[in-house]
Image: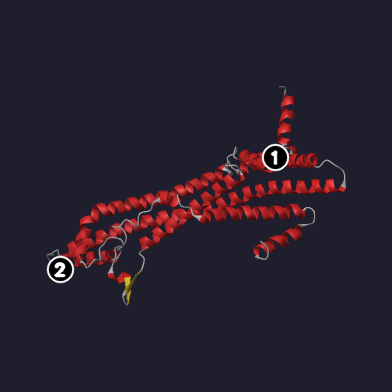
């Protein structure tokens, strides 16, 4: 087959592509580049006639003409209506691609900062916990140490005073952490319990966005990946950072469990049930299981995907109608729907 024949054959194939197939081609083409910026730079060097969107609209116009080829008024109206439907469908998928990428890019950037803060906070907690326990043990030994002479006693008191500044750092359950109200005891969450809650919340939201992308890909792009490569990489790195923080925290709990198990049992027996274990630590409720969280993205992921799809469709309808002076009507239709006036 000659080059000319191949080009004609390709033109024939392209002329029959559906709006969805054109949108998939665009998403696949962008994925060939390191990121959307690199793709845009490559497009700047191309002839406008070679743009996929230009080719798509040209092909869709040809399809409309082939479906309604007549020159009567009803044929022209039908052809125009059909073309608007085709263009709206393609434009909606383009906008959906853009909305999804922007939403993920924004969330990954923000979550990256949140994950870095979580890791930094965890490192501080671990150091404070270790030093607090060391300070309390050291103070206990120094308190019973018998000094010889005034200077040595002064040094002992200075050491105790310095250690007291760190001895209060204690993440274990204490009586002062609970507030009795009648027969009910309200317990205030510890710093570590709050850290766990926030970390799980961050991971849930990241997995929710990841799952929403997968829903959009499956429903609107026949399973083709739609995130630009740099945005997809940023999301994966952010999720990995959150998962690494959870793994570090779980390892921290494992170390504590091995070191202090015997101590906890003795304290529970002699200290009225209050032990230096973190609330929930011995029961295993503090452990974070990323796989379990990921396996249950919940209805929020579907809701988020539907929101992207609906907004993209609304904007596409408005944009296409705006070209023919019908934008105000499209805007009012959307406003009424959002206000609950129309379904």
**Residue 307 sits in quarter:** bottom right
Q: Quadrant of residue 275?
A: bottom left
Residue located 36% across and 50% down the image: 248
Which one is nearer the viewer's eye here, 134 or 32? 32
Quadrant of the rendered structure where residue 55 is? top right
Above-or-below relation of 62 to 150 = above
Q: Residue furthest top?
A: 1
Residue shown at 68% from the left, 63% from the top: 342
Picture coordinates of residue 278, whole percent (x, y): 30, 61
Q: Which of the two residues, 322 or 136, is positioned nearer the viewer here?
A: 322
Q: Would you place residue 86 above or below residue 186 in this image?
A: above
Q: Which residue is mark 2?
A: 150
Q: Which mark is residue 52?
A: 1
Of the two numbered discs 1 and 2 in the rendering, the one whose residue sits closer to the viewer: 1
Q: Quick one: quadrant of the N terminus?
A: top right
Label tally: 2
Q: Is residue 291 left or right of residue 151?
A: right
> Which type of secondary structure does the marked residue at label 1 adopt?
helix
Q: Earlier in the sequence, mark 1 or mark 2?
A: 1
Image point 36% across, 53% down: which residue? Answer: 249
**Residue 117 placement (x, y as % from top left):** 44, 56
Looking at the image, which residue sits at the far right? 72
| Quarter of the image where the C terminus is located | bottom right
Residue drawn 22% across the image and 66% down it: 160
Tag 1 and tag 2, C-beta contact below 8 Å: no
Q: Secondary structure at mark 2?
A: helix
3D distance between C-alphas at marks 1 and 2: 89 Å
Q: Residue 263: x and y, percent?
A: 21, 58
């Amino acid at each position: 087959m000659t080059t000319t024949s191949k080009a004609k054959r390709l033109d024939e194939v392209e002329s029959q592509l559906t709006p969805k197939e054109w949108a998939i081609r665009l998403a696949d083409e962008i994925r060939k580049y390191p990121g959307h910026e690199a793709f845009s730079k490559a497009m700047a060097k191309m002839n406008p006639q070679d743009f996929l969107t230009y080719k798509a609209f040209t092909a869709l116009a040809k399809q409309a003409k082939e479906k309604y080829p007549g020159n009567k008024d009803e044929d022209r109206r039908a052809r125009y209506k059909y073309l608007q439907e085709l263009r709206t469908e393609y434009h909606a998928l383009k906008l959906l691609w853009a909305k999804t990428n922007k939403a993920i890019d924004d969330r990954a950037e923000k979550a990256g900062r949140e994950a870095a803060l979580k890791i930094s906070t965890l490192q501080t907690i671990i150091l404070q916990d270790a030093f607090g326990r060391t300070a309390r043990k050291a103070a206990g030994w120094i308190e019973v140490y018998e000094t010889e002479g005034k200077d040595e006693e002064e040094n002992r008191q200075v050491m105790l005073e310095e250690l007291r500044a760190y001895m209060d750092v204690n993440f274990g359950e204490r009586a002062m952490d609970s507030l009795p109200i009648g027969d009910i005891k309200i317990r205030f969450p510890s710093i570590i319990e709050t850290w766990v809650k926030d970390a799980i919340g961050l991971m849930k939201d990241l997995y929710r966005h990841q799952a929403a992308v997968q829903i959009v890909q499956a429903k609107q792009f026949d399973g083709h990946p739609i995130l630009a490569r740099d945005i997809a990489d940023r999301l994966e790195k952010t999720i990995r950072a959150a998962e690494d923080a959870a793994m570090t925290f779980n390892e921290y709990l494992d170390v504590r469990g091995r070191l202090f198990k015997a101590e906890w049992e003795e304290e529970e027996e002699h200290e009225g049930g209050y032990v230096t274990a973190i609330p929930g630590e011995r029961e295993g409720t503090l452990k974070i299981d990323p796989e379990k969280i990921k396996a249950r993205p919940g209805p929020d992921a579907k809701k988020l995907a539907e929101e992207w799809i609906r907004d993209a469709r609304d904007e596409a309808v408005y944009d296409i109608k705006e070209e023919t002076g019908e934008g105000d009507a499209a805007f009012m239709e959307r406003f009424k729907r959002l206000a609950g006036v129309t379904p």
